[in-house]
Amino acid sequence: MKATEILMEEHRVIERVLTAMETMTARVESGAPYRPGFFLDTADFIKGFADGCHHKKEEGVLFKAIVANMPPLQGGPVSVMLAEHEQARKYTRAMSDAAQKLIAGDSAAQVSMLEAARGYTVLLRQHIAKEDTVLFPMSERIIPPDQREQLVTDFEYIEHTETGAGVHEKYE
């Protein structure tokens, strides 16, 4: 399997969580009862899987290979993706912080929690679309075939050594 196919499969897992976040956000906005801990669980998934495993593969392996093989003056796509990863981290922290305040009794934190959840889902849906349709196909064109196998090996190292054995499967 190609490195980009692995990342795209992980995007499908992330999209399922985005759908759950959108559903829960709509539920909260409608006034229906909900468990604020859902947003903490979601933040845990994001930190452990989306950021802790998936983005590590992108940032630590694929993006570096793209930059190393990209002609000068074309480094823009990777810097945009990195900036979006950082924005996603900010939304995740804000959502988690607000959910903790809400659980502690601060009902006003609900607004911040929902804003962060909405911001995250909108950002990630657009981000995933750009990676799937622009960045990943571009990487297949510019990264030489002899380097692509190493990407998969590096992904496996991240999953089993840096992220930890079984963590990826836990979040799937």
Image (cartoon, rainbow, N blue to C red):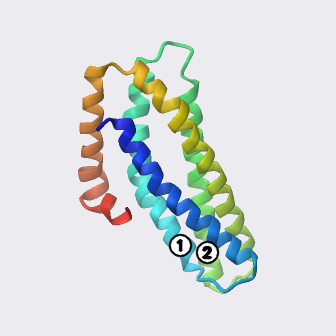
Please state which of residues 139 and 89 is positioned toward the viewer in this rendering.
139
Residue occupied by mark 2: 99
The percent position of residue 1, horizontal first and vertical second, equals 29, 38
**Residue at 52% in and 37% down:** 131
Please tell me whether residue 102 is drawn above or below residue 69 in the rendered image: below
Secondary structure category for the residue under label 2: helix
The residue tagged with tag 1: helix, strand or loop? helix
Q: Is residue 109 visible?
A: no
> Pointers 1 and 2 in contact (CB under 8 A)?
yes
The answer to whether residue 97 is seen in the rendering is yes
Position in image of residue 163 (x %, y %): 31, 54
Q: What residue is shown with label 1?
A: 40
Q: Which residue occupies 29% across, 51% down?
A: 159
The disc labelled 2 sits on which kind of residue? Ala
Task: Using residue 170 as the reference point, say whether residue 157 is left or right of it.
Answer: left
The quadrant where residue 2 appears: top left
- Describe residue 150's horizontal placement relative to residue 94 as left or right: left
